[in-house]
Amino acid sequence: MTKQNIEHYPYPPLSQPVDSDEIDLRELFAALWQGKWLIIAITFVFAVGGVGYSLSLPNTYKSEALLAPANESGGSGLAGMAGQLGGLASLAGVNLGSGGGSETQIALATLKSRQFISEFVHKHQLAVPLAATEGWDAETNQWLINLERYNPETQTWLKSDDAPADQPAMPTDWQLYKAFSSKLETATQKDNGLITISFESQSPVFAQQVVELLVNDINTHVKKEKLAETKTNIGYLRQQLENTNLTQMQNVFYQLIEEQTKSLMLAEVQDEFVFKTVDPAIVPEEKAGPKRALICVLATLLGGMLSVAIVLVRFAFRKEDV
């Protein structure tokens, strides 16, 4: 190709404008300014809706108790004997348990288990407050019963019209477990090992009573199981004592039986078996929820973002049509 041909067909200059889909910020601000009334209107509607929704929510109250593991104080009771006699018990074929933190974790897991909660709800007759109330009357300190769900005069459950035909009128154990566990919280402080058990309800009195009953029942439950286990160990040790003629093994069995009997006697008079109360549950005077201010702020922000998105989408479609 000659020099003349090259000059006859020059390349397009670099400064030549190229089509682009970039959006000018000034156009965006102009579009937002034009749609300001729509933005204000939608944001206002969401703000009013947030206020109305937050005011429709009932107040809830949380009562909590601060607990400490009972087996950490000097290794008393059955848990303390587990460490002292672990070697002798293993020699005799008896498991005294590990005690310590694992026992506390097992107690906490038991506290939130389906079986324990179901038995707890039925034992203390908590089905009606959990599944058949519309609110709490602070003036009379009584539950507002949902008469379409429960008849307090005949103490019978009623089935709603939209319920399936095969569904029983009374709530199932699974429904009661879900209703109860959603209000129950447990937390363990990592620095000192203290444990917090809390329960949230529309009734501050009910919340305090539930926490108090939970602490008492979990101590009783674990104590009952440990006592039964210790009695089983004593029975096994006495059986093995009768079956051996070795003086050394007889001494081992005598010592184990003596210590297990001492532990049994101490445990029978120990009410706070697994959890000791540091700060008992009280009737709360301040509400725990709902956080109405936060709900209103979030509703307003949601309305503002949604309205801005609508305005920008309309602007983008108008620009494509041009």
Image: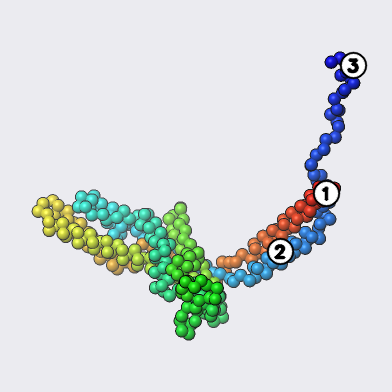
* Amino acid at dot 1: Asp
Looking at the image, tell me whether mark 1 or mark 3 is earlier in sequence order.
3
Q: How packed is label 2: few (under 14 Cα within 10 Å), some, or many (20 or more)?
A: many
Q: Position of residue 216 (x, y in %)?
A: 39, 68
From the image, tell me which residue sits under label 3.
4
Q: Quadrant of residue 307?
A: bottom right
Q: Position of residue 247 (x, y in %)?
A: 11, 52
Image color mode? rainbow
Judged left or right of residue 55, residue 104 is left
Secondary structure at badge 3 equals: helix
Judged left or right of residue 97, residue 6 is right
Q: Position of residue 48 (x, y in %)?
A: 71, 67
Residue at 43% across / 58% down in the picture?
Answer: 194
Secondary structure at badge 2 equals: helix
Looking at the image, tell me whether mark 3 or mark 2 is earlier in sequence order.
3
* Amino acid at dot 2: Phe
